[in-house]
Image (cartoon, rainbow, N blue to C red):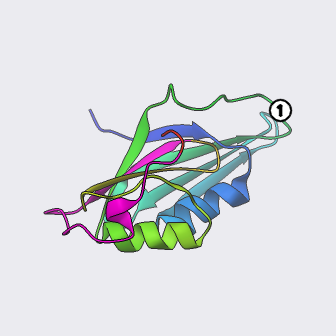
Amino acid sequence: MKYLHTMVRVRDVDASLRFFCDGLGLREVRRMDSAAGKFTLIYLAAPESPEAEVELTHNWGSDEDYGSARNFGHLAFAVDDIYATCAHLQAMGVTINRPPRDGHMAFVRSPDLISIELLQKGAPLPPAEPWASMPNTGVW
């Protein structure tokens, strides 16, 4: 058996690509538009693990409420520098829901409220401000 991908539904393709690609560094590896089915599938992968993909599914013209996405769980990504990643996302306007106070783990949410866990590669970084004293914001 081979793991292929995780699918998440997205409302705004541009906002989602900005978050996942510009924010997290994933790359679009392929895309499929289905006029008959009125949907677009966009497959993304991290440069270091191209075999594990995230499939963004956009249903054209749908006003379906996908809810808060809390029932999904989360996607997890290992990052080289959790503080730099969180600072970059914060500069893009992303709320850091669970700051990396421990230098090891943080949570953010995509534009479609998908929880994203960020984990520091290797050993945790030493605690640093502003993260060490930053409170949690919202839910993840």
Task: Write down the residue under mark 1.
Answer: 63
Measuring 57% from the left and 50% from the top, which residue is drawn there?
Answer: 110
Q: Nearer the viewer, residue 139 or 19?
A: 139
- SS majority, magenta: loop
Q: Is 84 left or right of 138, judged from the image as shown? A: left
Seen from this angle, which residue lies furthest left? 123
Seen from this angle, which residue lies furthest front? 133
Q: Is 118 left or right of 63, judged from the image as shown? A: left
Q: Is residue 86 magenta?
A: no
Q: Position of residue 129 (x, y in %)?
A: 34, 71
Q: Position of residue 137 (x, y in %)?
A: 51, 48
Q: Position of residue 18 (x, y in %)?
A: 63, 64
Reply above or below: 85 against 64: below
Q: Is residue 121 magenta?
A: yes
Measuring 59% from the left and 42% from the top, which residue is drawn there?
Answer: 113
Going by the numbered disc 1, the residue's amino acid type is: Asp
Reply above or below: 72 against 31: above
For the N terminus, the image quarter is top left
Q: Nearer the viewer, residue 26 or 120?
A: 120
Reply above or below: 133 against 65: below
Q: Which residues are magenta?
A: 114-137
Instruction: Name the secondary structure under disc 1.
Output: loop
Measuring 61% from the left and 32% from the top, which residue is drawn there?
Answer: 68
Reply above or below: 38 against 71: below
Tell me the quarter of the picture where residue 99 sits.
Answer: bottom left
Seen from this angle, which residue lies furthest top? 71
